[in-house]
Image: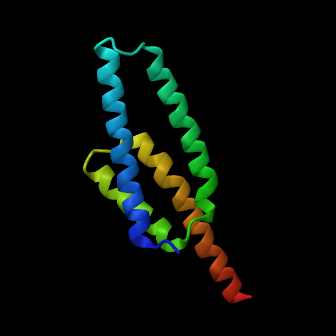
């Protein structure tokens, strides 16, 4: 089962990979190799991937989820993740984590 270090590595690799892809795409568009519409396609694909990410977050293990949050927090401190991206990609997993903690305490009380 994936643990903390796997979630941490995934957060780091996803941000770096998407940043590299965005830079390459921007260079190709600015050089005229690709049409401007490719930027729109990239943004639409990014939105679709974000929706799928939201759908799978509840199935991540708790350690993996904490690793993801930690990795994303480090990247946001370094300036690689923008404010609204941070709010979106940190907020939803945090809500899932808090829900798990509340659910665990409710089971212990009952």
- Whether residue 103 is situated above or below residue 68 in the rendered picture: below
Q: Residue at left 67%, top 88%?
A: 108
Is 51 positioned to the left or the right of 106 in the image? left
Pick out the residue farthest to the right: 110
> Can you say whether 37 is above or below 97 in the image?
above
* Residue placed furthest toward the front: 33
In the rendered view, would you say 24 is above or below 86? above
Q: Nearer the viewer, residue 39 or 78?
A: 39
Q: How is the image coloured?
A: rainbow
Quadrant position of the C terminus in the picture: bottom right
Closer to the camera in the image, 97 or 59? 59
The location of residue 6, given as percent across then percent down, is: 42, 67
- Quarter of the image where one finds residue 100: bottom right
Residue located 64% across and 80% down the image: 104
Residue 31: x and y in percent read 28, 14
> Total label count?
0
Q: Residue at (29%, 22%) from the top-left corner?
A: 27
Figure check: 103 above or below 79: below
Residue at the image position 54 percent from the left and 29 percent from the top: 44
Q: Position of residue 24 (x, y in %)?
A: 31, 29
Relative to 7, 61 lies left or right:
right
Task: Report which quarter residue 83 is drawn in.
Answer: top left
């Amino acid at each position: 089962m994936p643990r903390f270090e796997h979630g941490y590595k995934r957060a780091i690799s996803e941000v770096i990979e998407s940043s590299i892809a965005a830079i390459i795409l921007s260079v190709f568009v600015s050089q005229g190799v690709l049409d401007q519409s490719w930027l729109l396609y990239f943004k639409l694909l990014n939105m679709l991937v974000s929706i799928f990410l939201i759908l799978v977050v509840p199935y991540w293990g708790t350690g993996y989820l904490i690793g993801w949050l930690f990795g994303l927090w480090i990247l946001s401190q370094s300036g690689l993740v923008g404010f609204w991206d941070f709010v979106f990609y940190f907020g939803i997993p945090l809500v899932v984590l808090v829900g798990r903690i509340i659910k665990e305490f409710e089971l212990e009380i009952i």
